Amino acid sequence: MKAAVLKAIGEPLQVREVPLPEVGPDEVLVQTRTCGICRTDLHIQDGLAYVPSLPHVPGHEPAGVVATVGERVATVVPGQRVVPHLFVTCGRCRACRAGDQAQCRQPDGIIGVTRAGGFAEYFVAPARNLVPIPPGVDDGAAGLTSCAAITAVHAYRRAPVGVGQTAVVLGAGGIGLILVQLLKRAGARVVALSRSAPSRDLAQRQGADESLPLGDPEIVDRVLALTEGEGADCVFELVGLAHTMGVAAACTARGGRLVVIGEEAEHPAVDTITIAQRELVLCGSRNGGLQDAADAMAWMASGIIRPLIDRRFPLDEINAALDYVRSGAAHGRVVIEVPG
Ligand SMILES: [Zn+2]
Ligand SMILES: [Zn+2]
């Protein structure tokens, strides 16, 4: 089969023939139709996160059609459209039993991140990881369930906010824009912060009540001015830099909640006096569980989640697609299409 292969850190991917992956008794071979590109793909290519063993086939937002199933698989059939939950879990640990699959204590890898993924004509997933795609949901959008949409749904559940409350979404990329949709659906007032004017514009088109430039030195005062000096009931931090964490904490109301989704190897610029005296609740959020995946898909089918796709590239043009994401010119997801 054809696959886009990362042979060395920092190099472009090579589109070439590789052996078809083997399918275990509880696994499924899926013929890829589309696969979204996420910033984590760039981090993997750059060696900044999750260094997989090389050569590696990345791609962790795939959607496709079941081609063949292992001998013990009874839950999906060939021809069915599916997306994978990415975490290949142990199924036995405390997190797995609680349905918190992204916190599995003994995972056997992450599809497209540390295991082979969807920048290929086929990929393999355990049958229990597969979420069916409902009729009417486009493949390219459905694939975003695995990363952008599931992450937004899980983060939204980490912080109950709704009618009469204000949420700040700091970072208006793929996950942030879906969070704006979910928070508006819940009835919250939403303030989006982004450095990019087109992203702020997109956030407002998704329903954000206000959007403010993240680079503005007065940004905290502007958020406080919108909330009678109180700050937001909840701030979703999708950037993860030391500086943006400082902004996020300063924008959080007393007793409010700061949900950290953005990941960078930085120490947040928020002092313990602020955390203690203002009684901030800090909580992390990573991807999500199978329930979050099922709900993300259902909410996509019902139109609550409306992923934004900026542009589609064929698999052969994977490097042009990655460069386009890297350039920052994409507003919404970039999706790879794999000819069948
Ligand atoms: Zn991702
Ligand atoms: Zn587990």
Image: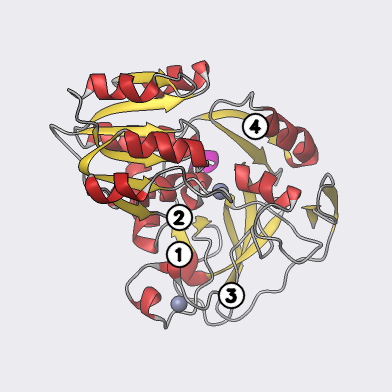
Task: Label 3, secondary structure: give it.
Answer: loop
For the point 64% across and 58% down, the residue is: 112
Identify which amino acid the numbered label 2 is placed on.
Asn
Query: Along the polypeptide, which appears first: circle 4 or circle 1?
Result: 1
Per the model, the C-alpha gap separating discs 4 and 1 is 28 Å
Mark seen at residue 102:
1
For the point 66% across and 74% down, the residue is: 23
Identify which amino acid the numbered label 1 is placed on.
Ala
Query: Along the polypeptide, which appears first: circle 1 or circle 2?
Result: 1
CB atoms of marks 1 and 2 within 8 Å:
yes
The residue wearing badge 4 is 312
Per the model, the C-alpha gap separating discs 1 and 2 is 6 Å
The residue wearing badge 2 is 287
Per the model, the C-alpha gap separating discs 3 and 2 is 16 Å
Label 3 neighbour load within 10 Å: few <14, some 14-19, many 20+: few
For the point 69% across and 52% down, the residue is: 48
Query: Along the polypeptide, which appears first: circle 3 or circle 4?
Result: 3
Up/down of 40 relative to 216, above or below: below
Q: How many marks can you see?
A: 4
Q: Nearer the viewer, mark 4 or mark 1?
A: 1
Image x and y of residue 195, in percent: 51, 23
Mark seen at residue 238:
none
Residue 153 appears in the picture as rendered: no
Residue 1 appears in the picture as rendered: yes
Image: magenta residue range: 137-141
Magenta span contains residue 138? yes
The residue wearing badge 3 is 108
Secondary structure character of the magenta stretch overall:
helix
Per the model, the C-alpha gap separating discs 3 and 4 is 31 Å
